[in-house]
Image (cartoon, helix red, strand yellow):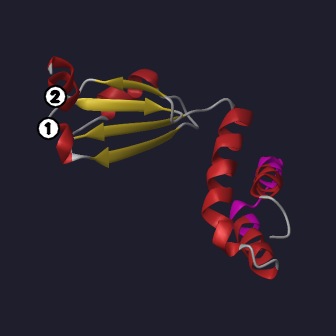
Amino acid sequence: MKYKPKVYAGALVESLLEKKADEKKIAINFLKLLQKNQDTKKAKEILTLAEKLLLQKTGNKKVVLETARRTDTQGIIKSFVKKGDIVEEKIHPELIAGIKVVVNGDRQLDLSLMNKLNNIF
């Protein structure tokens, strides 16, 4: 590995934050750089770090909504998500019912039936 993932992530974020950045061109050039340096095996780690860094610098957040089955979550989302936030919806049948909300990978609100059943026992 020529550079550490954190260095790659920082460079990618700085490139994306430039005023007239062409995001598609930046992505293509970044992948070419990883291939040239033979660092493509670390791409997932680099992108994860870049996402966290970009969210920090822009003041946005990543919200993951987990439900037992596909539901309309637009009403829930509108109440606490602003423009620029990343929203991801996941289906986890093991939740049985309810919803689990995870913000920035650490803070969470678990209103699932599975969580309530686990807390009883």
- Please give the residue where the numbered disc 2 appears in the rendered image: 113
Give the magenta range. Answer: 14-26
* Residue count near mark 2 (Cα–Cα under 10 Å), binned few <14, some 14–19, many ≥20: some
Residue placed furthest toward the top: 120
Q: Quadrant of residue 12?
A: bottom right
Q: In the image, which disc is placed on residue 96?
A: 1
Q: Mark 2 to mark 1: distance in Å?
A: 6 Å
Tell me if residue 69 can be seen.
no
- In the image, residue 4 sits, relative to residue 93, either above or below, namely below
Q: Was residue 79 drawn as part of the magenta stretch in this picture?
A: no
- First of labels 2, 1 by sequence position: 1
Q: Which amino acid lies under the numbered mark 1 shown in the image of this protein? A: Ile
Relative to 102, 73 lies left or right: left
C-beta proximity under 8 Å, tags 2 and 1? yes
Name the residue rendered at 35%, 37% in the picture.
Answer: 65
Relative to 69, 54 lies left or right: right
